[in-house]
Image: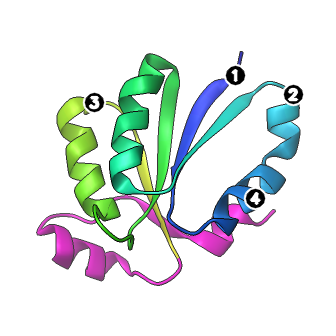
Amino acid sequence: MGFSILIVDDEPDIADLFRQRFRREVRQGRYVLHFAASGEEGLRRVVELGPELIVILSDINMPGMDGLTLLREIKQRRPELPVLMVTASATTSACAKQNNSAPPPFCQSPSILSG
């Protein structure tokens, strides 16, 4: 069984993009992709998936619990779990300003899905 990756994004098309990008790794059993459509659902999935979960990729801008709030909640529960913020619009300085701290690791969504 592969490592579990959780992708949290409110855009329905994102799941298909990740499935397409990582189809070979999923077929080979290297990764198991899990999806959540909101920050709240993402937090529930972190608990459900337990130690098999090795990384979370989360959008920043979502209705309800946004990605930065999700990041804080996850770090309280599982401080060792890497969380990568994936966004099409934010900059590191914008993330730092919203978070009142150093910016979380992030990349723009087209770059993570390319190549």
Q: Quadrant of residue 81?
A: top left
Q: Distance between the residues labelled 4 and 3?
A: 27 Å
Instruction: Relative to 15, say whether 50 is above or below.
Output: above
Q: Is residue 105 magenta?
A: yes
Q: In this view, does 71 lie to the left or right of 108?
A: left
Which amino acid lies under the numbered mark 1 shown in the image of this protein?
Gly
The residue positioned 66% from the left and 70% from the top of the image is 111
Q: Distance between the residues labelled 3 and 1?
A: 20 Å
Which amino acid lies under the numbered mark 3 shown in the image of this protein?
Arg
State which tag comes first along the sequence, 1 or 2.
1
Going by the picture, which residue comes out furthest to the left? 100
Q: In which quarter of the image is residue 101?
A: bottom left
Q: Is residue 63 left or right of residue 15?
A: left
Residue 25 location, x and y as percent?
81, 36
State which tag comes first along the sequence, 2 or 4.
4
Q: Which of marks 4 and 3 is in front?
A: 4
Cβ atoms under marks 3 and 1 closer than 8 Å = no
Query: Mark 1 Cα within 10 Å, few/some/many (few <14, many 20+)?
Result: some
State which tag comes first along the sequence, 1 or 4.
1
Q: Distance between the residues labelled 2 and 3?
A: 28 Å
Q: What stretch is highlighted in magenta?
A: 88-115
Depth check: give the residue in front, 7 or 12: 12
Q: Is residue 103 left or right of residue 10?
A: left
Depth check: give the residue in front, 108 or 74: 74
- Secondary element at tag 2: loop
Instruction: Relative to 115, say whether 89 is above or below.
Output: below
Residue occupied by mark 1: 2
Q: How far apart are marks 1 and 2 (CA)?
A: 9 Å
